[in-house]
Image: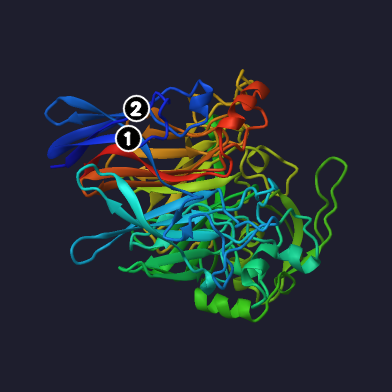
Amino acid sequence: MLKKRFLAAAVGVALAGAGASPVIAAVKGTIPVKSVEFIGMTAPETAEQRAAAYTTAKVKVIFKSGGSRVYDLHYNALFHNTDTIGGVTAGAAYDVTGTPLLDSNGNPTLAETPDANSLIRIPARGGDKLFLVTHFEYDWLDTAGADQYGKQPMTMSLANIEQDGKSGELSVTALRNIDMSAIDGLWIPCAGSLSPWNTHLGSEEYEPDARCQVEGSCASGAIGLAAMERYLAGTKTANVYNYGIVPEVTVGKNGETQVVGHRALGRISRELVQVLPDERTAIQGDDGTYNVLTMFVADRKRDLSTGTLYAAKWNQTSAENGGEADLAWVRLGHSSDAELEALVASGVTFADIFETAPVNKLADGSYEAPPAGFKQIIAGHNKGLVENLKLKPGMETAAAFLETRRYAAYMGATTEFEKFEGVTVNAQDRKVYLALTRMSSGMEDRPKDPANHIRVPKLLAGAVYQMDLGSWKLDSDGHRIDSRYVGTHMKALVLGQDIAKDAAGNTAAVDRIANPDNLKYSEKMRTLFIGEDSSTLHVNNFLWAYNVDSGKLSRILSLPAGAESTGLQAIDSLGGYSYIMSNYQHAGDFSSNIDPALKGQLEPLIDRSKAAVGYLGGLPAFK
């Protein structure tokens, strides 16, 4: 019998006291539960509401006995990027020696962008120890107000967490920077996930363009490596192929950390890696434009150091309601971290992997055929780049794992996914959910592109897609894929809606999702949590709860105007309570569509230097 423990929470969020600590009252006992329903909140209306992180949402619990009860949600900030705990400032960036980095004004570099969270439980004598790993994605603004995106190395922090046994409230007792010297620093870490074996799997998105490096230009829009040179502080030269990989963080019982970088999952603009229930198969998001969907199958359980990498081909069956397709999987190659480490250490460059030829665009917008022996591809990540490439002899492994997106296109896989971000798994139903922040560019019908697999109508508000999983499928060469969790079919599940600009400046329907990004699924609540990253469509971004059985979509958190919803993690049971970890970053990064008068009201209410690492509480525990 399924049993769930409850917490009743009362919180004053009329917003006069937004940001104040809620009063939480515990309800003892374990009660059999039939289902959980989120009761959404209205969109913010006043300037004070629009400037705050708050919730007035509720949870309706339906008992097996037939009755029901409603509980209030509340939002708690664990800490802010500007907080100093035990001498460590949360958002501070460091070089390889552990020295804090300074900005152009001589002030500490503080990232305003907390992203991924992994709340990790370490078994210990006397009770589990709790630790929270948090990414800081990039430094948005320095103290002079200058944009610093991609100009600074980034960091992960480790917080010691304590839980109040009576109220369920979480608090931070210690904080430290996680040493990234083992992987030569951290490059724009975005989302992440907790592995089934209790480690944190991170990410590095918008990987530096290795062609740009050898040709001495950034025509493809790639960001250079100056930030990582700053991190290395003259100890060595930054190598383009050391970034765009998966950092895995193992936390010990005393808070000691070990970081390894996994190359075997390929080098892409990774939003995150989601390991599936077999503890071998992983699905990966690739953020940007003209990007790829990849699958990795490890040789051994709980070991991502060796395995086979595949890329998906979208075989469209419908363009309706966001599109639908059968998936084929193109085998890119098999390798190991050790083999790839040796390859990178040998000094391999893009020019060693591919020969290139000029691309000629014709007057009608199409492209002249490539020279004999070359293949013409289109791949991103900051924009779609058409290239004529020829793989050099013996460089298949280097291409597959160091130039994954280019090689996927070269081998006939689909590289037309747009802003392919969050990934999460519903193990019971054998489904994977994937966030496509918008459907445009390569996802539109563009017959003059070198490839045109995806052909769906433009939808800037984006959608969450659902992928079905099957067993022992064949790859594009007719060989069996050694996994029982292979994606077979993909279709849009939850769609946004573009609208004409309203009075506030919204260009997507406020009561539907816009630009879905972070995703996490709760098996016990049967709920998919969807966090938004809308830079232009929603004036305020929201966190949504989508019930996969009823199809009900509920707004459960509103964030300060311009702030992105990040750091999602659904924790179904912890010490008698449940939590939804939820951060926000870059508050005050206003939509270009915002009403000028509204912007004027909000600017003095929002501290652009401040961002929060936090959680939604008031939830019952799910046993």
User: Secondary structure under badge 1?
Assistant: loop
Do the residues under discs 2 and 1 have CB atoms within 8 angstroms? yes
Q: Relative to the observer, which residue lies in front, 245 or 54?
A: 54
**Residue 66 shows which numbered tag?**
none
Residue 87 x %, y %: 45, 61
User: Secondary structure under badge 2?
Assistant: loop
Q: Amino acid at mark 1?
A: Pro
Can you say whether 90 is above or below 366 in the image? below
Residue at 82% x, 42% y: name it: 365
Q: CA distance from mark 2 to mark 1?
A: 7 Å
Which residue position is annotated with label 2? 12
Residue at 80% x, 65% y: name it: 216
**Residue 22 shows which numbered tag?**
1
- Whether residue 225 is visible here, answered yes or no, is no
Q: Relative to the observer, which residue lies in front, 37 or 351?
A: 37
Residue 411 x %, y %: 63, 60
Q: Amino acid at mark 2?
A: Gly
Q: Residues within 10 Å of mark 1 (few under 14, many from 20)?
A: some
